[in-house]
Amino acid sequence: MLNALDEYAAAVRQRLSQKRYDHCVNVSKTAARLAGLYGANAEKARLAGILHDITKETPVLEQVEYIEKLGGSVSFLELNRPQVLHQRSGAAYCRLVLGVTDEEVLCAVRFHTTGRRGITLLEKVLFTADLISPDREYPDVETVRLLAEKSLDDAVIYSLGFTLKQLAGGRELIHPDTLDCYDYLLEERIKESNGIS
């Protein structure tokens, strides 16, 4: 008999190419490992990992429909950066079609590309797992992998800084959640070093 994770994995497999599905499996495993390392819920991390890219290969207009069915609207930036849009449509799809109700898992899927102000532990786990899964190859991936073993916050801050630099250097649109997440984590670090709670 299939367990819930296997059922969700089967649903993801139907919607994605083999390469993208393999990525989701890798992220799921990596997220579970990071969750164990940093004290997050490993089952939720595993589930968020398998689901995170479920609409990555879905046509943009269909993605927009899922978001609008939940009363949301799509910004100009999101319409022009599908790599950002899929995090929102993925969370909407998981809720509407798959019946996922766990808000922590849905938010981890919802913000796995951009992060956000107030990013949670599970969201940091998925954000980082997506960046360091074994199939990833990009400049600085080894640096992020090393950081992730020592400090989840360091890995997220470094990755956000790298992303902001790349986007700004390429004169590409930057989602405000990405900048908010970066600022939030630095603000929290400054407060901590100054003894401010």
Image (cartoon, rainbow, N blue to C red):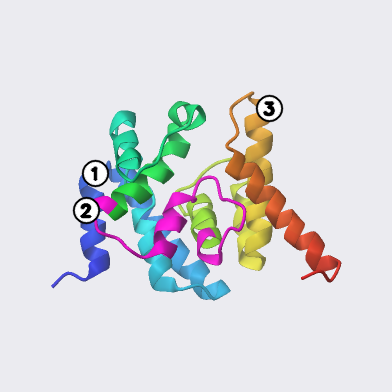
* Side (left or right) of 191 relative to 74: right
Crowd rating for badge 1 (residues with CA inside 10 Å; few <14, some 14–19, many 20+): some
The disc placed on residue 169 is 3
Q: Secondary structure at mark 3?
A: helix
Q: Are marks 2 and 1 in contact (CB under 8 Å)?
A: yes
- In percent of the image, x 50 and y 75: which residue is there? 36
Quadrant where the C terminus lies? bottom right
Q: Residue 172: which quarter of the image? A: top right
Residue designated by label 1: 15
Q: Residues within 10 Å of mark 3 (few under 14, many from 20)?
A: few
Q: Residue furthest right?
A: 194
Of all residues, the one furthest to the front in this rendering is 71
Give the total number of marks visible in the rendering: 3
Quadrant showing the N terminus: bottom left
Can you see residue 57?
no
The furthest residue to the left? 1
Distance from Cα at disc 2 to Cα at disc 3 = 38 Å
Residue type at tag 3: Gly
Q: Position of residue 138 (x, y in %)?
A: 56, 41
Which residue is more in the foreground, 167 or 106?
Answer: 106
Q: Which residue is mark 2?
A: 11
Residue in front for this viewpoint, 123 or 70: 70
Q: In the image, which residues are magenta?
A: 96-123
